[in-house]
Structure formats: structure tokens, C-alpha cells
Amino acid sequence: MAIDEGTAEFLKDTLAPLGRITVRRMFGGAGIYADGVIFGLFLSDALYLKVDAGSIPAFEAEGMAPFAYETKTGTRNIMSYWQAPDRLFDEPDEFVAWARRALAVSHATPATKKKVRGRAVTNVV
């Protein structure tokens, strides 16, 4: 399901302390960016934030799991994005703190280069 305008505006307003927040439609959901750097995904009515080894324990403590989707051969987990607890939507200060950590992870993650049909493409996800 695509993100609705109300949810997109809520994310922009709540996360404004992180910088210029943009929400871009992708994969039937949306990518969440601060000043052009992706740090979150909103898919199937759930928020996923970028993680690293240091931030995963906080997600695990909340009973959260990595983003997963079904393929023809089974479930595929995307370990770099974990579902954020729904309670964050009711706790703006804590929501910003979790999002700030995700943004820091995105900044610390080196961009990779992939060759696509003869040209280099930067992958920042």
C-alpha cells in the first residue's frame, strides 16, 4: 500500500529537527530522507529505520524484526532496515531520537558502486 498524504506530512513535521525531510514514493511505499540521505522506509503501514550492529539491540528489545518480503524462493530479510516500534508515533521526542540514530547510520554507511549496463551507479541504501 502506498503512503497516504497524512502520514507523509506527519513524518515531515515530526522529523523536521533532522533537516529537510522528504518522502519519496518507492516500491509501493516510500523512502524517508533527511537532506537527501535515506534513513527510513515506510512500507505496508510500517516504518523501518536504518540500523547497524550498535542499534539493532534496541529494536530487538522492542520485539521488532528486520524488513522482510516474499520471493518465489521464500522470505528475504533486509538486515539494514528494522521495523520501528509503533509507540514512537505517540512519542515525538523519542521518535526523533530513533530517527536521528538511523540517519547517523546512513551517514556512516559507505556508498557502494555497482555497474549497471556499463555505467557506475551509486547505491546509498
Image (cartoon, helix red, strand yellow):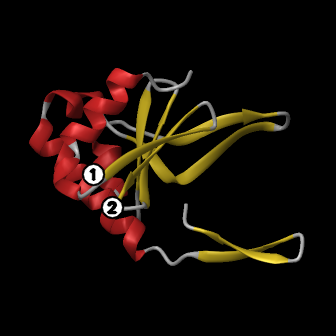
Q: For residue 53, say whether it is visible.
A: no
Circle 2 SS class? helix
In percent of the image, x 39 and y 24: which residue is there? 5
Instruction: Say which residue appears at 28% left-offset and 44% top-offset.
Output: 61
- Please name the amino acid that badge 2 sits on: Leu
- The residue that disc 1 covers is 99
**Residue type, label 1:** Ala
Q: Which residue is mark 2?
A: 103
Vertical comparison of 97 with 42: above or below: below
Query: Residue 67 or 14: which is nearer the viewer?
Result: 14
How many other residues sit within 10 Å of disc 1, few (<14), some (14-19) or many (≥20)? many
Circle number at residue 47? none
x, y (%) of residue 99?
Answer: 27, 51
Is the C-beta separation of discs 2 and 1 under 8 Å?
Answer: yes
In depth, the one of 34 and 109 nearer the eye is 34
In this rendering, does residue 108 appear at all? yes
Residue 2 appears in which quarter of the rendering? top right
Q: Residues within 10 Å of mark 2 (few under 14, many from 20)?
A: many
Q: Quadrant of the N terminus?
A: top right
Give x and y (percent) for residue 70: 72, 32
The residue drawn where x is 42% and y is 61% is 36
Q: Position of residue 41 (x, y in %)?
A: 47, 43
